[in-house]
Image (cartoon, rainbow, N blue to C red):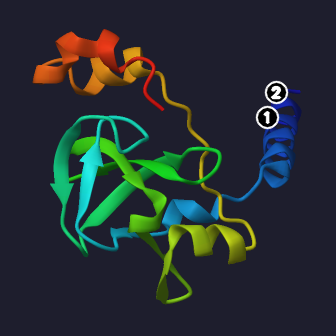
Amino acid sequence: MKFRAEVKQVFVASALAMTCPVVVHATAMEYSKTNAVLRSGPGDRFPAVGMVMAGSRVHMFGCTKEFRWCDVTVSGRRGWMPSADVDVEYHHQRLPMPSYVRIAERPGIAIVSFDIDSYWSRNYSKLYFYGEIENWRNIH
């Protein structure tokens, strides 16, 4: 009886796994296409938190729903880059993020939102602009 229950659990888990979408992005590699300013939010008006050098490897958490800005980590620093400055390795070539999203069959890029309070408290609480969060709350 116990053996049957275990077999049933394995079968159910296998069936569920087969229905889950495959995330192609999990093995993709992202790079900075150009020298880019790393921002504290998805927009040019947010304070800069660093510089990303062309060719640097970036770890991407996801992009805004329009794929204009991507939430990344570069050399341990978290921030936002314009998607046009991110290249994705796809079929042994590097494509700009907007092109990758258009042509990849299933790009698997996470869509992320931006909440300034939680994002800044997790990443920038020790930086000079954190105390001015009220001034930045309505930036788009």
Task: Count all numbered tags in the image, as a single digit.
Answer: 2
| Camera-nearest residue between 117 and 11 | 117
> Residue placed at 75% from the left, 73% from the top?
105
Identify the element where label 2 is drawn: helix
CB contact under 8 Å: marks 2 and 1? yes
Tell me if I can see residue 75 in this picture.
no
Quadrant hosting residue 4: top right
Up-down relation of residue 38 to residue 132 (above or below) = below
Tag 1: amino acid: Glu
Identify the element where label 1 is drawn: helix
Bin the neighbour count of mark 1 within 10 Å (Cα to Cα): few under 14, some 14-19, many 20 and up: few
> Residue placed at 39% from the left, 66% from the top?
85
Q: Position of residue 97 (x, y in %)?
A: 52, 68
State the quadrant of the N terminus. top right
| Camera-nearest residue between 109 and 116 | 116
Residue that badge 2 annotates? 2
Bin the neighbour count of mark 2 within 10 Å (Cα to Cα): few under 14, some 14-19, many 20 and up: few
Q: Where is residue 68 in the image (x, y as percent from the top left)?
A: 54, 53
Q: Position of residue 99 (x, y in %)?
A: 60, 75
Up-down relation of residue 140 to residue 74 (above or below) = above
Q: In this view, does 100 lie to the left or right of 69?
A: right
Residue that badge 1 annotates? 6
| Camera-nearest residue between 123 and 131 | 131
Tag 2: amino acid: Lys
